[in-house]
Amino acid sequence: MTSRSKLSPNRKTDPKPSNRLDQRYTYSDMDHSFNIATLRQVFTPEAVVHAMLGLRTKQGRTLEPMDPWRRALLRACVACCMLPMVSCGNDGPRFQNTDISGANYGSDFALLDPDGNTRRLADFRGKVVMLFFGFIQCPDVCPTSLQRAAAVRRLLGANGELLQIIFVTLDPERDSPEILREYSAAFDANVLGLYGTPEQTRETADNFRIYFRKVPVGGGYTIDHTATSYIYDPEGRLRLTVNYQSPAKAIAADVALLLHSSSTINDKEAQ
Amino acid sequence: MMKFRLPMILATMLFAASAAHAQVDIANPWVRATVSEQKTTGVFMKITSKADAKLVSVRTALAGRTEIHEMAMEGDTMKMRQIPNLPLPAGATVELKPGGLHIMLFELTAQAKEGDTVPLTLVIETGGKQETVEVSAAVRPLKKPAHH
């Protein structure tokens, strides 16, 4: 960016830009030169396939060159993937939130609902689960996350019934089951508030890679915590992490995608 | 020309004198609704002060205690901190909103229900002198997004 901003004033004052163009760009970064050769370098079939399929490179490793038949196979795959994209408009096969399919954490919990029943992830098979952690005294991020979750369910329309919203309190000492029940219901009847003992809460947060820490403030304490939400597919597998700023629309689209792919699989199994 | 100058100077002086007092404009004050047993909530508003000032404290019958808080995201982690006062630079609109600054109410004496209004007294300090500003904040439901 800096080199670009240095270049632009030159471009304006340059009396004969065309004559000096090659000279200037021979040594420049790729993003300054727009010739076909460079485009070919950047948009290699592998890179395009990579971008379209949403394949994830491991630890920033770039994709290795492919042999021709493999490339052809991938191109065919891309063509197949593009077909539903064309027919369904904007619904691409990619998730808008971060795909963490295959993650080896956050696989289950055992916490109490306000009625005192133990709940596990398996209780919600067949539904997409959106789970996040917070505390009710939090005036900002937690209500915002709950409002967003409720908005996602509204956006899903009839499919909203297939989304289970779960709010796990990080503050079981202050968030009693009664408050948890009433507070959750204030956002959406579908929101389920869960709690555990302080030890269970710590253990669950650790299992879900949720950082939290009590911080003294004024006469009491507040809780610093990870504001990320998790999304599970109807088979109970952890699939996505959702940033606290991710819009409801993007989440709803991803949930719809998970519900759709799951029902497609189920239809095939039924046949 | 001279005829008009004196009243103008006087008017300017008067204006300047009054501006030395806390000429503070409060827009859109609101309180987040609570559920019956909830003991805390947040207050949000836009504050514009004509002169350099600071919000030092807030009083309300709804809360036993109030604090001025600042929320910040550090990566994916939400952090909330108390600040001793809120600087109000001259002419700038300081927005207290979800995801940022807010007045935190503790030890609530009643439930904040949608449709209620909460009287608040803001204590604002301008040039070492404290003044109070009365504000009536509307209670907004938990359900709906806080803005738009």
Image (cartoon, grey):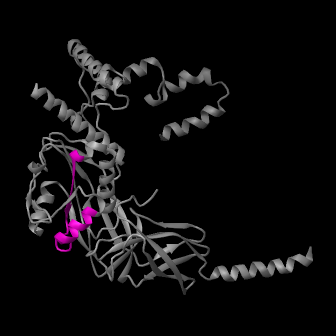
A265 shown above or below A236: above
Q: In which quarter of the image is residue A169?
A: bottom left
Measured as percent of width and height from the top left, residue A183 is found at 26, 66
Q: Identify the residue at image location x=27%, y=23%.
A: A81
**Placement of the N terminus of chain B among the 4 image quadrants:** bottom right
Q: In this view, does A106 lie to the left or right of A143?
A: left
Measured as percent of width and height from the top left, residue B137 is found at 47, 74
Q: Nearer the viewer, residue A139 or A22?
A: A139
Question: Do we see residue B46 in this rendering?
Answer: no
Q: Quadrant of residue A87?
A: top left
Question: Do we see residue B79 in this rendering?
Answer: yes
- Find the magenta span and give its range: A161-185
Q: Identify the residue at image location x=31%, y=22%.
A: A82
Measured as percent of width and height from the top left, residue A135 is found at 24, 66
Q: Is residue A80 left or right of residue B58?
A: left
A148 shown above or below A43: below
B64 shown above or below B77: below
Q: Is residue B57 left or right of residue A242?
A: right
Q: Nearer the viewer, residue A136 or B9?
A: A136
Q: Does the magenta stretch include residue B100?
A: no
Q: Quadrant of residue B52?
A: bottom right
Q: Identify the residue at image location x=23%, y=33%.
A: A57
The number of numbered discs placed on residues in the rendered structure image is 0
Measured as percent of width and height from the top left, residue A176 is found at 18, 72
Q: Nearer the viewer, residue A73 or A268?
A: A268
Q: Identify the residue at image location x=59%, y=80%.
A: B22
Q: Which of B120 and B97 is in front in this view?
A: B120
